[in-house]
Image (cartoon, grey):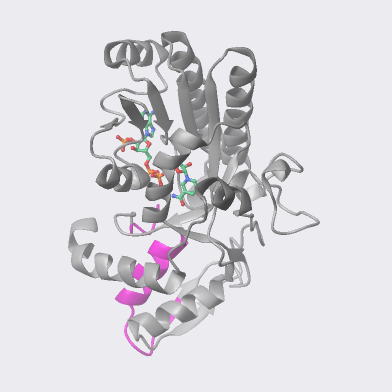
Amino acid sequence: MYNKVLVTGGTGFVGRRLKKIKPEWTYMSSSDCDLTNKERLQEYLSDLKPDAVVHLAARVGGIKEASENQSEFYYLNTLINMNVVHECYKVGVKRLLSCLSTCCFPDVFDRYPMIEDDLMKGEPAITNYCYGYSKRNLFLQSKWYAKEKNVCYNAFTPSNIYGPENTFDLDKSHFISSMIRKIVEADDGSEVVFWGTGNALRQHLYVDDLAQIMPTLLEKHVSEMPLIVAPDENLSIKQIIDKFLKISQKDVKVVFSGVLEGQHRKDASNKNLKDLMGGFNFTNLDDGLKTTYDWYCQNKEKDE
Ligand code: NAP
């Protein structure tokens, strides 16, 4: 349906996995074009003339980075998103599919799983407050450009993403990558310390499931709904660690520090996604963890 598709954030974790499925699309990095620079972006888009854009680029980080650099996360993400939506419109791009995050959802809600309509009902968790608001702004901007300017601009909302090629750098990584690295590097019998209490619940989305879903969303997701992309399983951090200990066959003592607990739960419904896709079988966490663990063992020297 679209001849020339541009992917922003094409060199990031999600972009690299999407490229394996759609190698014919154009994958942009920050060195190709700094999205905070609107003149450069306009020039880049005018030269490339894409007929559709998948917008993945963002300043992304784990709970520590996002909670300690809120002003930077707000400024960069807001600037990037404002520029991408407006410059796409100015150069005549008719289709823009942008990536939000379940971090946008309210910190506490009265009914779970949350649905797309709940995205803006209440403030995001303090640990990702500014990241959450910058993504909400992206949703609003897309929605109103679509309403007023005869374009199909909308978004999807993935839950926590994990899988091969994620960063395993402990200063930047998200929970599953840091869990794998910490446990693999620990000696049997030693203590491994994790943040929080282990009780927080998370839906962990396998990156290749998302990569498989995005091309269909580009074609078929035409409503303003910030379509949730999240698997069925919603497990506590403790349950996920237990699964990984079985897979890795490591015998370590798990300790929780209590700090940086994050949002207690943000489970979100995938019903609308499954309706749109005509069903979808998400990779179960056991299989996804095993594949990610194998990838890490084969590539860990390169990542350090
Ligand atoms: P990532 O690995 O950190 O990659 C970020 C990408 O954005 C890179 O390609 C980076 O380019 C690009 N970028 C950053 N600043 C830029 C700028 N100023 N100009 C141009 N490009 C810039 O992120 P990811 O994990 O793939 O995340 C992809 C999307 O998924 C993001 O929108 C994120 O918010 C969303 N998301 C992620 C998760 C998760 O768990 N990872 C969960 C929910 C939603 P360079 O590398 O060239 O600098």
Image-quadrant location for residue 252? bottom left
Image-quadrant location for residue 28? top left
Left-right relation of 196 to 174: right
Find the residue positioned furthest to the right.
Answer: 110
Q: Is residue 108 at all visible to an observer of this figure?
A: yes
Q: Residue 183 location in percent, x, y?
A: 37, 76
Left-right relation of 156 to 182: right
- Of 168 and 249, the residue lying toward us: 249
The quarter of the image that holds ligand 1 is top left
Q: Residue 277 location in percent, x, y?
A: 50, 48
Q: For the point 48% across and 57% down, which residue is it?
A: 280
Q: Which residues are magenta?
A: 168-192
Q: For the point 47% across and 76% down, which residue is it?
A: 241
Is residue 226 shown above or below 270? above
Is residue 56 shown above or below 269? above
Left-right relation of 243 to 180: right
The quarter of the picture where the C terminus appears is bottom left
Is residue 284 shown above or below 148? below
Q: Residue 225 location in percent, x, y?
A: 63, 36
- Of 28 and 174, the residue lying toward us: 28
Q: For the point 59% across and 71% down, which residue is it?
A: 236
The quarter of the picture where the N terminus appears is top left
Q: How many dots with numbers?
A: 0
Is residue 297 shown above or below 82? below
| Magenta highlight on residue 53 | no
- Of 3 and 301, the residue lying toward us: 3
Q: Is residue 256 at all visible to an observer of this figure?
A: no
Q: Residue 288 location in percent, x, y?
A: 38, 67
